[in-house]
Amino acid sequence: MPLILMMHIFTHLIAGCFVASLALARKEISFMEKIFILGASSCFGILPDLLGPRDASPWSHSLIVMGALMLPLVYLLRFFFKKRSYIELYVCFAGSVFAHILVDYLGHGVHLIYPFSPQAYTLPLIYLGDPTLWMPMLLGTLAFMFPVKMKSRSGLNVLLLLFVLVYLGLKIVRVGQIEQKLAREFTFTPEAVVQVHPVEENQMKTFADFWTLGFDATDSQRIVRGTVPVWSGQMRWNLNGIYRAEGEVVVERTGKDGLEVVYRRPSSENEVLLEVLEEKKDGNDVLIVARDREGNRRWFIFRKGKWGFL
């Protein structure tokens, strides 16, 4: 099994354990009871995936459906955990399921409010398996397992949770910065759609790629794609091209899990994408120097909201 896939699965397992460690951090609990509760929580941490893939079984990743399903299930589990109240067990076990769904929400689409809406939602901030998520949760779980003072482990777990939330918050800020930078450095029409997301699976080469975001800007006559580090560093363009004629920018919910897909419908069957070599302002206009497949240079000018071919 590839290492990154193993880290993906481990993230779900340890997220369930971390929820339980947060819920019971200030409770008197024996070591063996900890083991059993953490074991059950880790199982519930992967339960949604065991119930079926998100696209075929949308209810398996629904906060509403799974929250209701856990009500009787936790009631039955009280037979094995008689020292714990129903509320404590529900927070541990249902919370582990919710943690799985929310982690998936940060990586790919989940049907959060199914059956009230079949729409998939996502806030694409992480490539699942990101060690910045599971390492703090692992540390919090270990502090809960071993003989650490209740006050200390409670405070530690709160700090670790805050660390994860701050990390996600920084990524949200970074997404906004990338969108603004693209708008400053490139000229687009109002039809352009900019998407910022974790790098694609085929781009995951090293651990540093967990802290890299990809961007795709699709316009009627331009395509810009690349990556940028989360913490610092320059944008790297994988594609910066322009077409001679306009095409239609299409937004559809036909992607995996029913997510939004953006693409450009070609203006003709044999159109060619030219590589942009230089882009500069000339008064109120913008000039682009591009190169075709034969190496010939072509000039474009952006005037009155449209690209023209010179």
Image (cartoon, rainbow, N blue to C red):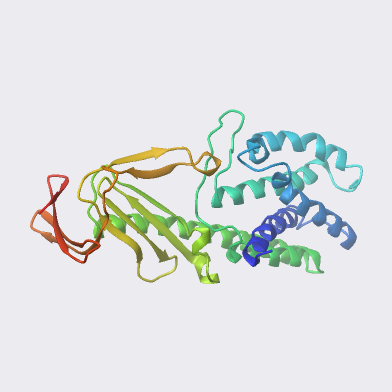
Asked if residue 246 lies left or right of residue 155, the reply is left
Q: Is residue 150 above or below residue 86?
A: below
* Of 262 and 76, the residue lying toward us: 262
Q: Quadrant of the C terminus?
A: bottom left
Task: Answer with the quarter of the image where residue 7 lies.
Answer: bottom right
* Of 192 and 270, the residue lying toward us: 270
Q: In which quarter of the image is the N terminus?
A: bottom right
Asked if residue 75 lies left or right of residue 181, the reply is right
Q: Which residue is drawn at 44% across and 61% down?
A: 213
Q: Where is residue 19 in the image (x, y as percent from the top left)?
A: 71, 53
Asked if residue 30 lies left or right of residue 278, the reply is right
Q: Where is residue 42 in the image (x, y as percent from the top left)?
A: 76, 54
Q: Where is residue 14 in the image (x, y as percent from the top left)?
A: 71, 59
Q: How many labels does the image show?
A: 0
Q: Is residue 20 above or below residue 85?
A: below
Q: Residue at x 78, y 46 (%)?
A: 88
Can you name the residue that lies furthest to the top here?
116
Q: In this view, does 198 lie above or below 254?
A: below
* Of 270 and 7, the residue lying toward us: 270
Q: Which residue is drawn at 40% across and 65% down?
A: 228
Q: Position of residue 93 (x, y in %)?
A: 76, 46
* Of 304 and 161, the residue lying toward us: 304
